Image (cartoon, helix red, strand yellow):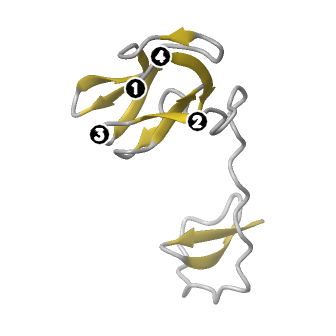
């Protein structure tokens, strides 16, 4: 048997899973949560230098990061695409608001983002 703690909408449930259990399902009331342990933070992506620069490149709409056009250290001109997001099946380039150098890329392809999320920073 293996024990797991599953949190659904802020309520923790203690769950026991038995391998090779009979075909008759057992239904039990949710266990009262003990002091819930905070979940471990997801591992940070390898090339992130979150917030390293002073100029922010932000998402213009909610969507999903489709691709990263520039890498840390690349020189960019005002209007150059740094990150491309996908929203409602459209590709939306998130561009450099001014000339500079990419200081950090704060997202990875596949990440979800909201409008205004900082995707990258420039110096």
Circle 2: element type: loop
Q: Which residue is mark 1?
A: 97
Q: Residues within 10 Å of mark 1 (few under 14, many from 20)?
A: some
Q: CA distance from mark 1 to mark 3?
A: 16 Å
Q: Which residue shows up at 43% across the image and 22% down it?
A: 98
Are the residues at dot 1 and dot 3 in contact (C-beta closer than 8 Å)?
A: no
In this view, the mark in front (1 or 3): 1
User: For residue 54, which numbered disc appears in the image?
Assistant: 2
Q: Is residue 102 above or below residue 121?
A: above
Q: Which residue is mark 3?
A: 61
Q: Which residue is mark 4?
A: 99
In this view, the mark in front (4 or 3): 4
Circle 1: element type: loop
Q: How many marks?
A: 4
Q: Position of residue 54 (x, y in %)?
A: 58, 35
Residue 65, image quadrant: top left
Q: Earlier in the sequence, mark 2 or mark 3?
A: 2
Q: Position of residue 39 (x, y in %)?
A: 70, 63
């Amino acid at each position: 048997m293996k024990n797991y703690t599953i949190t659904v909408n802020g309520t923790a449930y203690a769950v026991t899973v038995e391998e090779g259990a009979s075909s008759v399902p057992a239904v039990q009331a949710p266990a009262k949560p003990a002091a819930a342990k905070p979940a471990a933070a997801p591992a940070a992506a390898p090339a992130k230098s979150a917030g390293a620069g002073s100029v922010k490149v932000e998402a213009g709409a909610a969507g999903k990061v489709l691709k990263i056009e520039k890498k840390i250290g690349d020189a960019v001109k005002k209007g150059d695409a740094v990150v491309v997001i996908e929203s409602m099946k459209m590709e939306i380039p998130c561009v450099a608001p001014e000339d500079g150098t990419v200081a950090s890329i704060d997202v990875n392809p596949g990440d979800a983002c909201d409008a205004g999320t900082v995707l990258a920073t420039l110096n």
